[in-house]
Amino acid sequence: MKQELIYGLHAVEKFLKQSPHLVYRLSVIKGRLNNRQQSLVDQAKSLGVAAEFVPKSAFNVTEGNHQGVMALVAQKPQMNESDLESLIEGLDNPLFLFLDEVQDPHNLGAILRTADAVGVDAVIIPKHNSVGMNATVRKVASGAADNVRLIVVSNLVRSIKAMQQSGMWMIGMAGETDETLYDHNLTGSIGIVMGTEGSGLRRLTKEACDHLAAIPMVGVAESLNVSVATGVALYEVYRQRHQLR
């Protein structure tokens, strides 16, 4: 089974809680532990996972703020098109999020965190020209990476069209339209489609959507960061579905 490295207190805590049997090794920086580090070590011990204490230099393989903890774990099986098609059949009014070649792991991690918060049923990304699950994504997602279905497909447009055949309406987020996000009923079976950093939705992806919708903006900035825009869109779906004012 393939292995991957995860790091950061929240990401490791969540993985350990959900899948302790998939943890090969837990490494903690040598020295005096803070309360959260000690709590993690105690949690691991109670689940039958021993912690090893290593020098700071052992953490040179990580990116960003590792918070003194990392774990080598078994990589969970990747979900694909067949999982997507079987998933939609068992859901009432599903909410899917399609990401058209998002390439920054910090953006994907932030998006997964928001998707988890609002109850997105699946996040769909293309296999090529897109960042996949990695340690940085897990760290930024703060535990949400293992609580949100991430489905990797070979052709995003084809998957969008397949979901349309199953009754899902696709709302593509784009600036070049007079319709705003708030003009649409988002309470049914909905797919929100977000574009890549900088250039937004690709032409074929845009053409595959049922509607395009913009986020109103009055400042000098021409667009929002994709993770921020995704958050705005998903929380409007949440607001409508929960009848919030």
Image (cartoon, grey):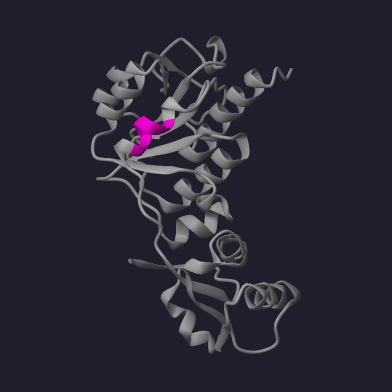
Q: Is residue 198 visible?
A: yes
User: Which is nearer the eye, 173 or 21?
Assistant: 21
Question: Was residue 158 drawn as part of the magenta stretch in this picture?
Answer: no
Please give the name of the residue rendered at 71% of the width and 71% of the height, measured from the top-left corner.
Answer: 36
Q: What secondary structure is the magenta-colored segment mainly? A: helix
Q: Does 113 sit above or below residue 223?
A: below
User: Which is nearer the eye, 212 or 123?
Assistant: 123
Q: Which residues are magenta?
A: 83-87
Q: How many marks?
A: 0
Q: Position of residue 45 (x, y in %)?
A: 64, 78
User: Which is nearer the eye, 51 or 128?
Assistant: 51
Please give the name of the residue rendered at 37% of the width and 34% of the height, measured from the top-left corner.
Answer: 84
Q: Quadrant of residue 99?
A: top left
Q: Is residue 196 visible?
A: no
Please give the name of the residue rendered at 61% of the width and 29% of the height, measured from the top-left corner.
Answer: 235
Q: Does 163 sit above or below residue 111?
A: above
Please give the name of the residue rendered at 53% of the width and 60% of the height, measured from the top-left corner.
Answer: 139
Q: Position of residue 152 (x, y in %)?
A: 33, 43
Q: Does 223 sit above or below residue 73?
A: above
Q: Quadrant of the N terminus?
A: bottom left
Q: Position of residue 71 (x, y in %)?
A: 50, 73
Q: Quadrant of residue 200?
A: top left
